[in-house]
Amino acid sequence: MSLSLRSAVRLNLILLLIPVFLWLLLLIILPHIDMLLVSTQVKVRPRVYEFSFANYGEFFSEPLYWRTFARTAIMSIAATLLTLVIAFPVAYYIAKMLRGRMKSFLFLLCLVPFWVSELVRTFGWMILLRESGVFSNLFQWIGFADGPVEMLYNDATIMVGLIYTSMLFMVVPLVTILDSLDDSLVEAGYDLGGNAFTVLRTIIIPHAMPGIVSGCIVVFMLTLGNYLTPVLLGGKDSLWFTAQIYTQFITRFNWELGAAFGFLLLFLSSMIVWMGLKLSRQTLTETMG
Amino acid sequence: MTEQGPGGGHAPSYDLECRNLVCRFGDFVAVNDVSFGVPEGDFFSILGPSGCGKTTILRMMAGFLQPTSGDFLIKGKSVIDMPPNRRPINMVFQHLALFPMMTVAENIAYGLLRQGINRIDARKKVEDALERIGLPGSGEKKIKQLSGGQQQRVAIARCLVLEPAALLLDEPLGALDLKLREHMKVELKKMQDQFGTTFVYITHDQSEALVMSDHVAVMNQGRFEQIGTPQDLYYQPATAFVAGFVGDTNRWQGRVESVDRDTVKVITQDGVQLLATAAGGEALSQGSQVEIFVRPEAVVITLESERITSQDNRITGELISVLFNGANSRALIRDRHTGGELDVALPQTGEFSHLQRGQEVHLGWSLAHAKAFIQKESGG
Amino acid sequence: MIPSIPQPKSFHALYGAYVTLFFIYLVLPLVVVAVFAFNDSMFPSLPWNGFTLDWFFNPDEPRLGLFHDGRLLRSIWTSFYIACWVTLLSIAVGISNAFLFERHDFPFKNMLYMLMLLPLVIPGVILGISILVFSSTIANWLENTFGIEATLLRPSTFLVILGQFSFIATICTLVISARLRKFDTALEEAAQSLGASQLVAVWTVTIPYLKPAIVGAAIVAFLMSFENFNTTLMLVGSDQPLTIAMYGRLREGSTPELNALSLLLMLLSGSLALLSVFVQRDKT
């Protein structure tokens, strides 16, 4: 019995391991290994490939590619930081200044954009910002502008869209963590002679750090991998790296180069996430789980 | 240690019987060669400090834990190879484990439906059970709507509707507050009488075990120290551990000076000479290290020293404080010579109602009430 | 900076104004999309030409209403079909994983857990292309070795389902695990003690306990699948799901029919959101 009981547990374990193995092996691990292999191949004749790092070489020698890459990274970091700066006061307001119904209502309101497709949200911004859009008409009507104003297709617009899309993933962890801060800690900070600035710097922000890190990581990931917002709001010149990957794969049918790009993007995002975790002394399991 | 089970020997009339149960977790021996039998309809308690292995025994009986060796029989048949759901005994869990997403009726019907009883019969049995536990018409309530005591009764009824050979209870009163616990002690005992089911009850609270049980096994460090009626344990403790664990007691450590049949003369660590009766069935000789136990109510307390001249042991002390608790009032006395403290029951005669702190009192007790046990290195 | 600490009135006014502005920023694009669904004009923009329901119900071109647009309706059906499969698979794997990680110990458990979290930090586009590359490799191999034409492994609805499942399964696992962690295993033992076999105990006690989390995870999985764009874009075959179809229309420049569709989507996800809030509140 003792044996059969143990073997029942073992059988159970094996049955539960099968789905997770199939999933991770077939859909995550093997595809990425295969993508790595493809990225190190170069077509020498039709249907004949050779091992080479030429695809990576092409990335570094062609300014368009690495500039797009750098631009995507820098704008993603900027968007993440801006999202944090904009979201923090709002999260603080919801978590600490409000009570009861108003609090849960505003918190739910923050979730609204998440429930609506990114396409719909971006569409909304297009209606607002295009030449024949709502703001353009509004400005003419007030007298700010003489003719139609085109506000789409520039970096600032891309930024507005990216921040909008990511806001939820910053606000939710921030509200959650700020809510867990005991009011009496803030009161004690004041009681011991602190002012608004020192209390914020020495008590509130250190407490909120885990939330800030997890919010920043998620927002950064989503921004870096975004495709819709830069392409629709930035137009042809958006120069976003995911768009470049799409071009190589679907338009040019150059999978080898596209796979190399994919790997570079994955490498960049992993590095920045890893650095973020190291700097804040957190682990992925804590942040995500 | 003393394996004279109630009834004695291996009588086949036992409802439940454990034979040489051993349970090891790696190097740690949680249960060490425990044997006992429980007669039908008995209220049997296993009493011991936390970590003594009593929960391990219960979980082995319920089937959630496989013993390293030994056997467990229900009505004479070994069930050691049977999974928990097939054993004809049920368990009441420490935190009751009532299913929160089901109603009271659904909780009670759960086991009936698993037996394949049709819903109509099951409903009738559930209604009967609710009637018997004094909760008629509460079937549609959610578990959360019941009070702690009501939940307790539902948890027991849920098992008893299955008419099990025995009910295993894992400290079910532990989570209740003090007042409710006192009340539930009485109620549990009544329920057991009413249903006539064998109960195996584990607890670390000696008063629960003494009040409710027909038989109690005192357990320590994986072994049974003694099995007996509550009176046996209280008045005839078989080991120093039992004497110290069951009921309140005063304790001295000392060395045997001389032995005269059952009577021993002991010099305590503080240099006081005491007379005591050898207990525990082990031979005492001159020079043995012993522990002496005296119950608070065995000590006679008086203000006039002449009154206790007939006692075998006499001490003069001063009152430190009175712990007033109605009929259970105690006095804390400091021995004049040694500074040792004694716990003494105060008779409610009024003689002592005006005791002052620091007042001189005289204490005495007979050697029959002083039990001397060989002191063990790891004992107590 | 909390209500118990006095601050100047101007600070409160300024802070309140900022938060108000923030919420206007949050809802403005959605309101605009909804309002222009009723504009009696060929373009979703000003001027306002009056109220109409044509963009929902008009049967003919050029003012084709949503409910008569066969192509769009078909893409809604495709999305629905995909979302159902993704939800089903993700929930099944999520439950299995929750039991695996909460109830069992095995070597390399932490490593497997980390691997399981990985899909959340891989950009969706890359998940898409890696699966595309791998499935093509297999399909090519099958074709060259056995002469089998594996159309499923070329961009198709099947691949879209797998692609979305690859990361939605992680989310379902996390949601269901969190609930299972709070489950008191004594309840399962109680069920066994009352005569249920282990399987029956899980089915009658543990699964009902997990139900709010399962329903919540299913709603999130359904919506994430329905609205997914990045992964889908790389794997889509001939049947276009809704997001891909809408994207095409957006680039072409569109009629307010798209607004009507967006409004419908908002209502759908809004009611699902409410449902999930309701289910979570019912937790015991």
Image (cartoon, rainbow, N blue to C red):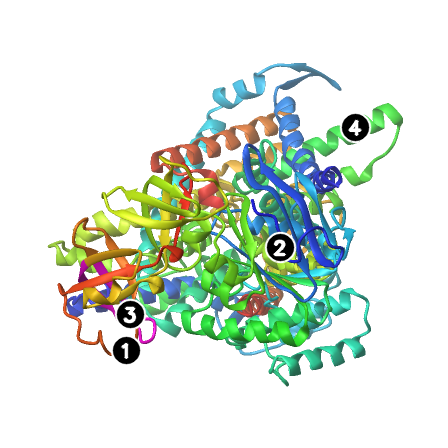
Point out the stretch of residues depicted in magenta: B317-333
According to the image, label 2 marks what residue? Answer: C221
According to the image, label 4 marks what residue? Answer: C140
Instruction: Calculate the distance from the C-alpha at mark 2 to the C-alpha at mark 4.
Output: 32 Å
Task: Give the structural element (helix, strand or loop) at label 2.
Answer: helix
Instruction: Calculate the distance from the C-alpha at mark 4 to the C-alpha at mark 3.
Output: 96 Å
Asked if marks 4 and 3 fall on the same chain, the answer is: no
According to the image, label 3 marks what residue? Answer: B346
Q: Amino acid at mark 3?
A: Leu
Residue drawn at x 62%, y 69% as measured from the top left: B156
Identify the mark at residue C169; answer none if there is no mark: none
Q: Please indicate, yes or no, whether residue C180 appears anywhere in the rendered image.
A: yes
Q: Amino acid at mark 2?
A: Ala
- Residue A247 placement (x, y as % from top left): 60, 35
In this rendering, which labeled residue sits more in front, label 2 or label 4?
2
Identify the mark at residue B349; answer none if there is no mark: 1
